[in-house]
Image (cartoon, rainbow, N blue to C red):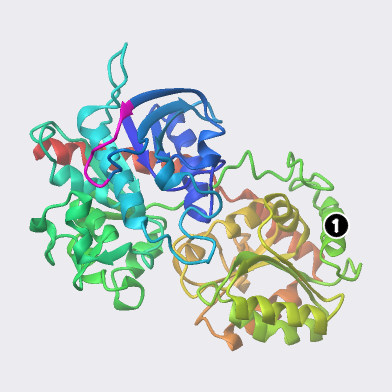
Amino acid sequence: MRVLFVTSECLPYVKTGGLGDVAGALPAALRAEGVDVRTLIPGYPGVLDRLENIKVLRDLRGLPGLPSAAPARLVAGRGVDGGTVYALDIPSFFGRKGNPYLGPDGKDWSDNHLRFAALGRIAALIGLAGDGASGRAAWKPDVLHGHDWQAGLAAAHLHFPLWPLAGLKRPGTVFTIHNLAFQGLFPAETVPTLGLPWDGFTPQGFEFYSQLSFLKAGLVYSDRLTTVSPTYATEIQGEIFGFGMDGLLRARADVLHGILNGIDTDAWDPARDPQLSALYDADTLPAKETNKADIQRAFGLSPDIHAPLFGIVSRLTDQKGIDLVVQAIPHIVARGGQLAVLGTGTASLEQALAGAARHYPGRVGLVLGYDEALSHRLQAGVDVLMVPSRFEPCGLTQMYALRYGTLPLVARVGGLADTVTDCTDDALSDGTATGFTFGPVTVPSLINAIDRAFALHPQTERWRGVQRSAMARDVSWGASARHYVETYKAAMAAADRG
């Protein structure tokens, strides 16, 4: 089985969020299941600089929506993990350093519709005609797997193929929703510039309230739809989390499945992580205290090994519930706790957290920005990792926490609800508890969960038991990869039926 991943980001080349983690880790798990996975990604500088043995496969100049004179090529190279990576070497679109979606002013690039339409168009070209390699049989996928709105037009281009591609057998299509809130909306007048027919600009196609929606194109024209947790698959079929797409998703519920994300358990392993001050496993949990002391130093916190240390690694936004944490900080400090925050986001929340760090020196620490190594150290060093999101399709940080014996404290939504078992009396008694969950997503409910963490923390043996249960939870990609294989088979069968 041959599968083409189509994604706008992928570790270790470029990452802004969980999509990058998933696109980087899932292919390896699929290869372990016998799937030939190749990845198509924009040719950002961080991609082209890290590929080896790059070969030019196609000249793309002149295709609808692409530059007619400036360089535009499809290239292939060997990726960091040894797999094949296809890159769109279009410097006028992707030769920009920094965030792949935002310009230096923090706003979306004005040509994002052209940039990511190119990603979808070339994905469809490979899906119908193969990769164009010479000297050997061209590689052509059995399944095209698009991720999030940036890849949404791939399925539309397969549905409305331009001559001379019309009539060629298309691959099965799978489209994964990583976050329904981001929908790739652009003015209607962009439709013809992207090589799309007006026939598709209808409520039954890719039109969404008089705009073109890349995301809706993926939802309408793909054979199978997935999202990143079972609970989120249910939530997005309702008005609150459906963001206007709930009716469409209910209509396609028979082909929509929630497949829980996993994590790279080799990269995230406290027994082998080179970033940590002290390595440990479930049998050597006292060594975790060395990492706690390290984080207290790194965040300017008082060296108090007995103080419950809460941590956050997150985008600092209201969606992530960071405003709730700001309101809960006085309570955490009053009870003798500490808080370490790593992230960047909304200016008002950054300022509020910086103010709390000044107001509570030695008790609240803040590092603005993102540092992969520091995130590993924080996961190992804190006692409780907080993820109080108002909605969370899956979430990965709580899985890293489980892996590191750090108890997650999470809102009972989406993938957070699917991955963390609350420390109820029954769960503590039968050994299934792995953290703390709360709902509704309000300050009083959050504080109640914080208080339960404070109550359990001094009970060393019970706390250790929960840590061991957390570390025993399977957060790998193994089971999920097998679910994807079955989904691919169903998509291929749907394509064969036409």
Mark 1 is surrounded, within 10 Å at the Cα level, by few (under 14), some (14 to 19) or many (20 or more) other residues, namely many
Would residue 26 appear left or right of 115 to someone viewing this image? Answer: right
Query: Residue reaching furthest front?
Result: 69
Would residue 104 appear left or right of 450 to someone viewing this image? Answer: left
Where residue 268 sits in the image (x, y, percent)? 65, 45
Q: Quadrant of the N terminus?
A: top left
Q: How many marks?
A: 1
Residue at 35% in and 53% down: 150
Q: Nearer the viewer, residue 137 or 336?
A: 137
Mark 1 = which residue?
Answer: 294
Q: Magenta segment range?
A: 58-65
Where residue 251 sits in the image (x, y, percent)? 17, 64
Above or below: residue 443 compared with residue 434 = below
Residue 223 in sight here: no
Q: Nearer the viewer, residue 36 or 147?
A: 147
Where residue 28 sits in the image (x, y, percent)? 49, 34
> To which quarter of the image does residue 130 belong?
top left
